[in-house]
Image (cartoon, rainbow, N blue to C red):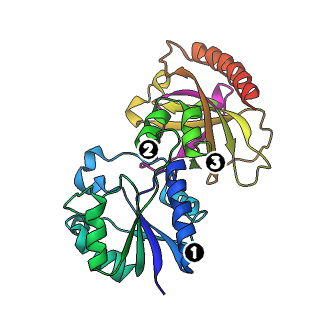
Amino acid sequence: MGCAVSIGFYDGVHIGHQHLLRQLRAIAQSRGIKSVAVTFRQHPSKVFSPDKAPRCICPLTERIELLKQYVDDVIVLDFNSEMSKMTAREFVRDVIREQVGAELLLIGFNNRFGSDNISNFSYYDKICGELGVEAVMATRYEGTDVSSTLIRQQIINSDFMSAAALLGRPFVFSGSVEHGYHNGTKIGFPTANLSVDNAQLLPHNGVYACWAKTIDMPHPMAAMLNIGCRPTFKLTHFGTSIEVHIIDWENPRNLYGEIVEVEPVCLIRRETNFPTIKQLQAQLDEDKINVTKKLLKNE
């Protein structure tokens, strides 16, 4: 039995993607076949322009989990140099029809594929028909303009409220806790140092009010997030660090090796190089007060 398929990178699985995937599922159900989202392991621009490839709103594992909320199955393809050279006809024939086994291809209004880079639906309709695959044009999402590119920019600029509106959920990222220099502990602000995937999109360097949670916490806890190069401690040569100080967390156990999920809420201030550690400590005391106020306001 064949399946109904739609293709995309689906970064963030935002409300526009959700609109498309709901259509795919409805069409598949009406025909008694499976709905399948076909996505790629890495962003196609990694092949075309590696230096310009965007960081991702969510990692592959999360993307697959989100897609499975809307379709019966997800197929992940490795977009490589060979695939990038396929024409639209070759892609439909060799991948969509032969590899995936699709009998129907739902195409988004601005979707295009194949090295011939055609944006005309009638062209896809023609080649699909010749190859025995029905092409269907998806209806356009009629709400606010939405794109993964726009959401990435909102996150980078710390506009988390706008990003959440377009994602249909808050933006979150996660990382495993690793050993750091324990400088935070020495000044009364112990932090969980997070190792985050290099492909993960993050906001600009600064201090943020956020919610943080581990798998065994009953609910997210108020926290301070610092993204930066630790200039006051003269550690800029070690690159960017991501550190979370969980406010009022009284559990004495350490978190090393655990995964912490972080939901940034708002920017408190940009990264600053303080003349002394004591001035940094005073600022962190003030940051803690501001973070608590912001989070209580947004509860």
Instruction: Please tell me in which quadrant of the rendered image residue 111 appears.
Output: bottom left
Numbered badge on residue 260 = 3
- Secondary structure found at label 3: strand
Asked if one can make out residue 230 in the rendered structure from this viewpoint, the answer is yes
Q: CA distance from mark 3 to mark 1?
A: 41 Å
User: Mark 2 vs mark 3: which is more N-terminal?
Assistant: 2
**Label 2, on which residue?**
147
Q: CA distance from mark 1 to mark 2?
A: 28 Å
Mark 1 vs mark 2, foreground winner is: 1
Image vertical order of residue 129 relative to residue 178, above or below: below
Q: Is residue 207 magenta?
A: yes
Q: Which three-letter amino acid code belongs to the residue tagged 2?
A: Ser
Residue 243 lies, in percent from the top left, at 57, 36
Q: Nearer the viewer, residue 221 or 265?
A: 265
Q: Which residues are magenta?
A: 185-209
Q: Is residue 103 magenta?
A: no
